[in-house]
Image (cartoon, grey):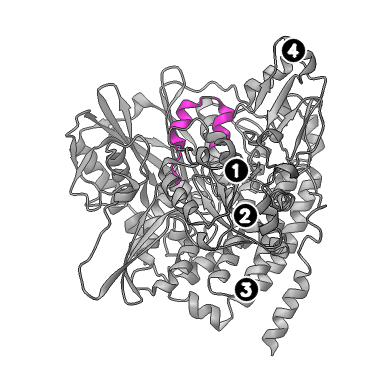
Amino acid sequence: MTDKRYIEIVTNPGTVKLEDIPVLEYTDFVTFLDLVMGEEGTHCVAYFVLPQPGYYRFICCMAADENHALLVFSHIQHIDPALSLPSITAKHFQFHVFEREMHENFGIDFAGHPWLKPVRYPFDRADQSQVMNNYPFYSIDGEQLHEVGVGPVHAGIIEPGHFRFICHGEQVLHLEIQLGYQHRAIERLFVERSGILQQSVLAESIAGDTVIGHALAYAAAIESLAGITVSKNLSVERIIALELERIAVHIGDTAALCTDIAYQFGQVVNEALRTIIINTTQLWCGNRFGKGLIRPGGSNYPLKPLVIGEVLKNLKEVEERYLQVTARIFSLPSVLGRFEGTGKVTTMQASLIGAVGMAAKSSGMYRDIRWSHPFSAYGDLLYEPVMLHKGDVWSRAMLRKKEVEKSMAVIRELLKEITNYELRITNDEIVSPNYDLQLAPSSMVVSLVEGWRGEICHVAITDDEGRIVLYKAKDPSLHNWMALALAVRNQEISDFPLCNKSFNLSYCGNDL
Amino acid sequence: MAMIFEEINILRRHGKQFVPDLRSAVLPGIFRGRPVISGDITQAEAETVALLCPVGAIAVNSGKNRSDQAVCSLDLGKCVFCRECEFSLPGKIQFTNDHKIASNVRERLIVSSGLEQPVSVDPLLVRREIRSLFKHALKLRQVSAGGDNAAEMELNACGNVNFDMGRYGIEFVASPRHADGLVITGPITQNMAEALQICYNAVPSPKMIILCGSDAISGGIFSQSSALNREFLRRISVDLYIPGNPPHPLTVINGILDLL
């Protein structure tokens, strides 16, 4: 007997007909959600509102990691300015950001939500009286406490965001993060600009440090909606690009972590190593961040023998030098003194907030889309995530080092599988991108990718003519910003830059 | 003692990473720099790629006076360097690896068909105080206003061990009070408009403005977004436009050096 309360998606990406997604009464929805949340390794990848004439359809996608599946179910509410639903966040805290988003976009109240605050101040927010200058910061009264406000413009060349600390002397009691400065209405643009090329460029502009991750999530979503599959070789190439991106950012972050503890030696050596990796990506496709490399249906830059040779040569060079310098970094008492025990996020906290990717894995949570919902060439790889357990800055730094090694091994493995370029030409197997794909009507696709930061989730919904009417792009940062806020509690405020860099979260990825 | 030797070993392996001459550096392999449009592109072909372009960077000149006008032009201030027009018309449009594409004149970013000339700074139009005051030491404050953080990463790379912009006395500083000008990245969102203005006001005069990246120059792929507020640009004059998606560090550094 199959459970009629949900529809299961067992592929990644996976497309379902909108009419096949069960609609539950809200109380049944919550009961079923409680049941799902009771299972090991389940977490919410998307929960959003699809506005329909006269009603809102709330669609929830839960990842069941152990079963390598997604469970999708929904509820419907009539559009009413006074709409108020009992909050799910009150029971399952990881829903806090999804309910906040719906509240901000549509004015829906969630009774019992502990923290119904703005997420990104979208231009079309329901309550236009909410502006950047009147964010409702949490405050504590006390003669010995003071507040520190930082941003939106920060000391370095980084993105804007505002951090408000409540401190007792040097000690941070509470940090609240206000975002939205980078909001450029990307999800809306996906609907307004219907061309697949335009959308591809948009996808790679969601977060410049995750160009490949987001472009891949988009391309896979579109291909699934169009009902096409790409060649094995192209799948392999995409994962090589994704892992090069991971290596580049992880090495860059190793440099930045050294910067924040004034260890200039570690900084300059790692910066130079990152340069080698991103220059390899440029050699491949003409752009250091891989813009233009991932496109639906095909590729403008099939891997040629010359590039493969450079990738292998540069990986060897970078690996030897990276291992040499990280061996040094992780043995210096002055480094360990700053990294160890700083900015701890416990497994319990990570689980509660629904942390994903690096923030989860460094806190002992087994969560990696490459393992739980394999996509593209990961289908054949049986990837085992790198795990660490202490949840401190050291763990997040060490996780980077270990993932760099692992990604290099993955790339070498995959390069062996790429068919000889000449043979691919002979087989007529190299195809250009396809910008004229016809998408399945009245459908929803969910596409998950493990970017370097963690789980990227793109959801697209089409109308009865196959046009995209709703696009949801989720960067892992959406979940993980809360991890940073928790990490700095009871820390010295001077450790904030270090904690911040250890997560290296995306502002634009959150603000969209 | 042994520890020192370890670092010396790493440094020996590290070698010299800096690009010795940034002014004449050539990028290896493929790089999407200044495009060249062939003079024999037809109007029909130009119209096809104009339609294809995701950001409307290609303009087709139709009309009676066509004989003395180029068939089409490509605006680098809008271009996201996706290279799709080249793939669509190989041989007619080609993105060269010329990374020097910055100019102080907005119109100079427009590449016309049949006219192959480099993008350059017009020295006559550079404000006098820029060269007299900032030539040997230029401190810049960067403001990120809605970009995707790629341009920011490249600006950071300008100061790294490879590009070492500091060798020319050009540096990014933490406070607008210490700065001689602003480098703006991103299409300027509504939510960042006020902070950008405050930051601009905090820079002591005389000050210069650099727009870095196609999204800063024209809005780029976000130009149609309802969440932007680009009024700031109407109130100020821009001293340098640096196109790119994102601009390469060599584009940024050479552009600034040409201006000084």
Q: Residue at coordinates 69% horizontally, 51% vertically from top-left?
A: B256
Name the chain under label 3.
A
Q: Nearer the viewer, residue A66 or B221?
A: B221
**Marks 3, 1: nearer the viewer:** 1
Q: Residue at coordinates 47% horizontally, 56% vertically from top-left?
A: B202
SS class, disc 3: helix
> Which label's residue is closer to the chain start, 1 or 2?
2
Q: Are marks 3 and 1 on the same chain?
A: no
Q: Are marks 2 and 4 on the same chain?
A: yes
Q: Which residue is mark 2?
A: B155
- How many marks do you count on the picture? 4
Q: Nearer the viewer, residue A225 or B138?
A: B138
Residue B54 appears at what percent x and percent y? 60, 28
Does the magenta portion include A214? no
Does the magenta portion include A200? yes
Task: Name the side, left or right, on which A105 lies relative to A277.
Answer: left
SS class, disc 1: loop
Give the dominant element type of the magenta stretch: helix, strand or loop.
helix
Q: Is residue A320 visible?
A: yes
Q: CA distance from mark 2 to mark 3?
A: 19 Å
Q: Residues within 10 Å of mark 2 (few under 14, many from 20)?
A: many
Q: Residue at coordinates 79% horizontally, 17% vertically from top-left?
A: B68
Q: CA distance from mark 3 to mark 1?
A: 35 Å
> Which label's residue is closer to the chain start, 2 or 4?
4
Q: CA distance from mark 1 to mark 2?
A: 18 Å
Q: Which residue is mark 1?
A: B238
Q: Report the span colored magenta.
A: A182-202
Q: Which residue is mark 4?
A: B65
Q: CA distance from mark 2 to mark 4?
A: 43 Å
Q: Which mark is drawn over residue A264?
A: 3
Name the chain under label 4.
B
**What's the amino acid at mark 4?**
Asn
